[in-house]
Every structure is written in C-alpha cells, then in structure tokens.
Amino acid sequence: MQNKVDSEKFGKFSPDQEELKFLEGSHSRGFELLRAIRIFFECIKGFRALHFVGPCVTVFGSARFLESHHYYNTAKEIGTELAKQGFTVMTGGGPGLMEAANRGAKEAQGISIGCNIILPKEQKPNHYLDRWVEFRYFFVRKLMLAKYSYAFVIMPGGFGTLDEMFEIATLIQTGKIKNFPVILVGKNYWEKLYSFLEKTLSIEGMIDKQDLDIFKFCDSPKEVARIIRESAIKKFGLKYRSRRNPLACFKERKVIKKRNSKRS
C-alpha cells in the first residue's frame, strides 16, 4: 500500500512563507526584480559593515559543541593565537565552536567578527563579537566569510561546515580564489572523510590528486597560527598600514585602526 504523501512537506518546503514563495520557482518579473534588489542590498550591507575589518582568518565549525568539549577549548586557543598574530578572527557568529574562536580572539584583545545567519533555531550571535552582521541568505553570508580572509580553519562540524569547507575547496580548485591555507583541525574527526576523497574521488578521477593538497591537517593552535601568518606574508604579500577614514555617506564605522590588507 502506497504511503500518503504530506503535500505540505513534499519537495521544496520552508516554514517561512516568504522563503517558500521564493522556492516555488518563477514568479512575475516584478517579484524577481525586487528579490534581486533585496539580495543586492544585503551584499552592500555586508561590504559596508566589513570594509574596515582588516586581514581576516575565517574559522568554520559546529554550533553544537558545548564549552566543556575539548574541541571548544581548541577553537578558543586558535582564536587567541590568531589574534596574537594580528589577524581578525571571523566566524559565522553563532554558538559552539564559532563562539569559542570569537571568544579566544576577544579575550586576547584581538578583533572578533561574526556573520550571523537568520535561522528558526540554533543560531543567535554570541557574546564575544566586536561587530556582527546578520544575513538572510546563506550564499551572501558565505561570500562575506570568504571575501576578507587569508586562510580558513575548519573545525569539526556537520552539514553547514562541510558546505563551507567544500565551497572554499571548489573556489581554490577552480582558481576563483587564491590557494589560501585550508587547515583541518581534528585529524581523528576528518581522516575518514579525507580517506574517502583520496581513495574514491581521486581514484575514480573525480578530482585530481593534487586537489588534495588544498587541505592541511594541524591540531596545534600555535602551529595553525604560524602556518597562516607565514603563508599570508610570504606567499600572498600581506601588508600592514593605517586605514583611510570611513566615508560618511556610506555610514561606515572603523573596527580596526591599525591593520589593513593587500590581497592582490
């Protein structure tokens, strides 16, 4: 006997009626234009808010690890070490390992930034942010997390962390961004996934063997910071200089007065 399908949850579904309408497919040209304008202004909001954040390192990781977990302590130490090296620590702005990295940077007198996503549950800005920006769209948020960073630290996480990790890997693989360090922290957590990439995707020819070189394993917070600093300065020409004053017409505010980056 065929099960009755719940029509409300079949296919594209969202509890948010506005998102549900967006996912339904084509609408009037006017509706699509207004949606594009909304996405554009969300991008502008992110660019304005983050224009003065300086050279960043983005730390990805799960929102679900509690303060008592050893991964939380590791993420916190990484945030501290990155701040000591002069980097702004950027995360998704939520709890768990994102909070830990922001906390480590904040307590080390560094700069702590969050790009928060509006979700029905699980995601509220943590209390260790010097500045945070809230986004409706995941793809705009991921753009901001990638745009300002010289390196990416991947802590243990779930679907969201995997999505972010593989998007960065794809951008590097296809030459859309430079080969910035992508450091996997928690070798025991990631080694089975890496083995799948090596023994299945690579062998089947789905990726090239050298694509695996995108990822580096490192469980030492001090070593993570050292690798990133050396790579940013020697390979990508990071330079420090004073920032220009923000433009009043854009209503920008400085977060960092002494650091700047030159990525290209």
Image: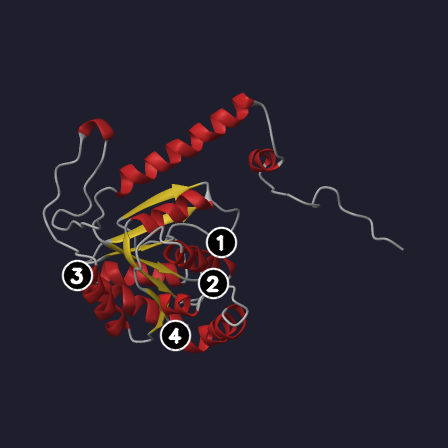
Indicate which disc residue 233 carries: 3
- For the residue pair 178 and 248, the one nearer the viewer reads as 178
- For the residue pair 184 and 220, the one nearer the viewer reads as 184
Question: In this figure, what is the number of numbered marks?
Answer: 4
Taking 178 as reference, is 120 above or below it? Answer: above
Q: Are marks 2 and 1 in contact (CB under 8 Å)?
A: yes
- For the residue pair 105 and 2, the one nearer the viewer reads as 2
Residue at disc 3, secondary structure? helix
Q: Compare marks 4 and 1 and give the one earlier in the sequence.
A: 4
Q: Dot 4 corresponds to which residue?
A: 70
Q: Dot 1 corresponds to which residue?
A: 122
Indicate which disc residue 64 carries: 2
- Who's the residue at 36% across and 50% down the image? 176
Which three-letter amino acid code belongs to the residue tagged 3?
A: Ile
Which three-letter amino acid code belongs to the residue tagged 4?
A: His
Q: Within the image, what quadrant is residue 150 found in?
A: bottom left
Q: Are marks 3 and 1 in contact (CB under 8 Å)?
A: no
The N terminus, quarter of image: bottom right
Say few, some or many: other residues with alpha carbon within 10 Å of mark 3 (under 14 / 14 to 19 / 20 or more). Answer: few
Distance between the alpha carbons at the discs numbered 2 and 3: 34 Å
Q: Position of residue 109 (x, y in %)?
A: 18, 59
Which three-letter amino acid code belongs to the residue tagged 1?
A: Glu
In this view, the mark in front (3 or 1): 3
Distance between the alpha carbons at the discs numbered 2 and 1: 8 Å
Q: Compare marks 3 and 1 and give the one earlier in the sequence.
A: 1
Q: Position of residue 37 (x, y in %)?
A: 43, 28
- Who's the residue at 27% across and 64% down the image? 79
Q: Position of residue 246 (x, y in %)?
A: 17, 35
Distance between the alpha carbons at the discs numbered 3 and 1: 37 Å
Q: Compare marks 2 and 1 and give the one earlier in the sequence.
A: 2
In this view, the mark in front (3 or 4): 3
Distance between the alpha carbons at the discs numbered 2 and 4: 13 Å
